[in-house]
Amino acid sequence: MDILIGLQWGDEGKGKIIDLISRDYDIIARFNGGANAGHSIYHNDKRITLKLLPSGIFYPHIKNIIGTGVVIDPLAFRAEVEQLQAALSDADLIHRILLSAKAHLVLPTYKYWDMYFEESPQYRTIGTTKNGIAPTYSNKILRQNVRVGDIFSNNFEAEVLQILTRQYLDLQALGQDMPMMQELYDDFLEACNFLKKIQIADTEIIINEALSNNKKVLAEGAQATLLDIDHGSYPYVTSSNTIASAACVSLGVSPKLIDKIYGVTKAYCTRVGNGLFPTEITGSLADELREKGGEFGSNTKRPRRVGWLDLPALKYAIMLNGVTDLVLTKADILSGMSEVPICTAYEINSETRDLTAPTSVDDSARPVWKFLDGWDIPFSKINQQAQVPKELKLFISFLEEELKIPVKYLSTGPQREELIILGN
């Protein structure tokens, strides 16, 4: 099994990369997060954003598995499937989807808990997407939630009603504006009935049987390394483990069966929401980079914060994930700059660090900069390695030397075909 993950704060272009390389796989398996993720892919010149569905959904030969570690909002799932069926004129795509029976369901009250926590002065403002992801994982850990396989239980409707009623009353007592309780309940059960159209199974058995039969499996991560609940820039992180090892837990696959680990990084950095961002830039240059790079949330449309490439954080992400191959995206967005800044280290308390955990860098840390010559070329003309400008080749060589791993793929634009393979 191979794994593909983001190495920064998300939005690195993972969806496009998976969409392109997935043609070589038999199974694409999503292993974390929920409908808070947004992978944008250009298919037949249409920009399509996938939230819950794995990025192999466009290929008829691929099984698309949503693993146990993912949390599934039935209403969001139904909407995404129906919208994609209409966009692709492909009613059969539901037969390419498998749901883990052990994946947890996002109940409709969880979104309102998200809203309450974000808007109440008594709690931290994290900058969540308010999709109910954190409350779902919280109730999973408390063992107070329902799972996908429970929809076939005779007690399912009564158990859901009990949970919703309790939470609804608690939210009302806290002053949270709520829709009608019966509406939430009915809409949720109707969406759960839609889930019954999808194959629901012990997906860990399906994946392991496929691997034993020499089938190729690609595990797809959502969000990115620096948003990992344990190793990211806590508390401004997502609510799941985003690193490569989480794929083994979520999908039920032994670490012995892992082969390639692809890590995706932009040629610069972005992040959405609150939290430390040491290489962040502001002002007109940030606005220009944001507009040129289309740096607005795939899911929320929020403008992303932008900054220069952070090598200490990138080294940390590569270490955590055991990355074997790098994928570099959005170098085309930096085209036209005379110099390209890279943060190579931090000075923290008179100590220079070239490898740092996100939580060890604070406002007093001073970035150490290296400036490489920029490149200026129409990237639409690049379709093979020989056409890559020498300045960009030097940029890539510098990354490979610093990070000790090869850059395997170079993205040259947003379209799925705009990707070239690098190397000897």
Image (cartoon, rainbow, N blue to C red):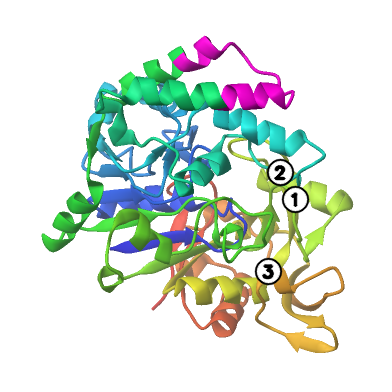
109 with respect to 64 (left or right): right
User: Residue at position x 57%, y 43% from top?
Assistant: 134
Quadrant in which the C terminus is drawn? bottom left
Magenta residues?
Answer: 167-185
Q: What element carries label 3?
A: helix
Relative image position of residue 140 (x, y in whole percent) = 45, 45
Label 2 neighbour load within 10 Å: few <14, some 14-19, many 20+: some
Quadrant in which the N terminus is drawn? bottom left
- The residue identified by callout 3 is 358
Q: Are marks 2 and 1 in contact (CB under 8 Å)?
A: yes
- The residue identified by callout 1 is 274
User: Residue at position x 22%, y 51% from top?
Assistant: 26
Relative image position of residue 98 (x, y in whole percent) = 26, 38
Q: What residue type is labelled 2?
A: Gly
167 with respect to 91 (left or right): right
- Mark 1–mark 3 distance (CA, rounded to whole Å): 14 Å
Relative image position of residue 144 (x, y in whole percent) = 45, 39
Which dot marks residue 127?
A: 2
Q: What residue type is labelled 3?
A: Pro
Label 1 neighbour load within 10 Å: few <14, some 14-19, many 20+: some
205, above or below 39, in the image = below
